[in-house]
Image (tube, rainbow, N blue to C red):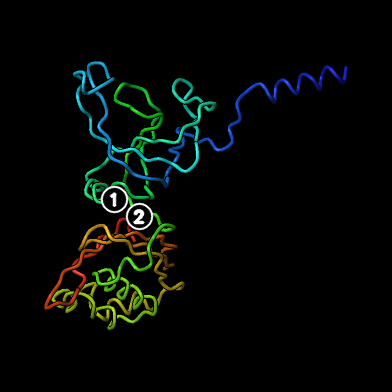
Amino acid sequence: MHKLLLCGLLLLTSGGPSLAGCFDVSKGEPERLTGLLTHRIFAGAPNFEDVQKGDTPEPGYVLTLDEDICLTGDADFADPSYRFDEVQLVETEETSRDMQALRDERVTVSLRDPTPAMTGHHHRPLVAWVTAIEPDDETADPTAGYGTAQTVVEAFYRALETGDGKLAAGFVIPEKTRTGPFSPEALRRFYGSLPEPLRLQSVKALGADRFAVRYTFTSTAGRCDGRATVRTTERDGRNFIQSIRAESGC
């Protein structure tokens, strides 16, 4: 009797696919992925086979992952036994330009609405919309910023790490530092009183005058895992910060 029970348990535990490493699309997973970003022309209607045989070209992006993944959370379209290493990415208004700039680079993307392939317009097992994109830190060249505006962006955030508003404001175009959030006093008041000071994580070029910045700090409102896009401008041969757009809300 005990042997029969044991055999039954073995059959139950070994009969289905392993769910280890699978993302649950019903929970909005995955939220972030890292891999090689490439631009593709997919074959659309009418046959979804070959643009050189009359199918409509559908431009898009593919993220090639370092390791295979699988999906759960959709009984009709997510098969946890099927593993794959390419994801179809859809640009958004906020990320279109950055995705073009980072084509053929290793990147980390933040995603929304991850969906298992359901129609002929879904060209990989997983399709997701990109809300943010940045170069992959692990492959960053430490000398990449030499001779570029990246150094002034780094200097601005290094000054904020110590709460030195006057020093940080010196790296911003003067007309934005007289009053408002970029004034020396405003920068000192906020960044100089943080329970946990700002720490710069990375600065990566998105173009000659656009940079993706990652940082952390803790304020009275809680912890911030910050992401921002910084735009620079050159005046009299020197680089200044022109604008900062917080992508993470802090």
- Choose between 24 and 231: the one closer to the eye: 231
Where does residue 94 sit, x and y in percent of width and height?
24, 48
Vertical relation: 235 (above or below) 144:
below
- Choose between 156 and 108: the one closer to the eye: 108
What secondary structure is found at the residue carrying circle 2?
strand
Where does residue 88 sit, x and y in percent of width and height?
34, 35
Residue under label 2, please give it: 135
What secondary structure is found at the residue carrying circle 1?
loop
Q: Residue at x 28, y 68 (%)?
A: 150
Quadrant where the image shows the N terminus: top right
In the rendered structure, find residue 78 and report the number of the disc placed on it. none
Residue under label 1, please give it: 102
Mark 2 touching mark 1, by CB under 8 A?
yes
Q: Residues within 10 Å of mark 2 (few under 14, many from 20)?
A: many
Quadrant where the image shows the C terminus: bottom left
**Going by the picture, which residue comes out furthest to the left?**
236
- Choose between 226 and 232: the one closer to the eye: 232
Q: Residues within 10 Å of mark 1 (few under 14, many from 20)?
A: some
**Going by the picture, which residue comes out furthest to the right?**
1
Vertical relation: 211 (above or below) 34:
below
Q: Residue at x 50, y 37 (%)?
A: 68
**How many numbered badges does the structure rendering display?**
2
Mark 2 to mark 1 CA distance (whole Å): 7 Å
**Going by the picture, which residue comes out furthest to the front?**
52
Q: At label 1, which amino acid type do we have?
A: Leu
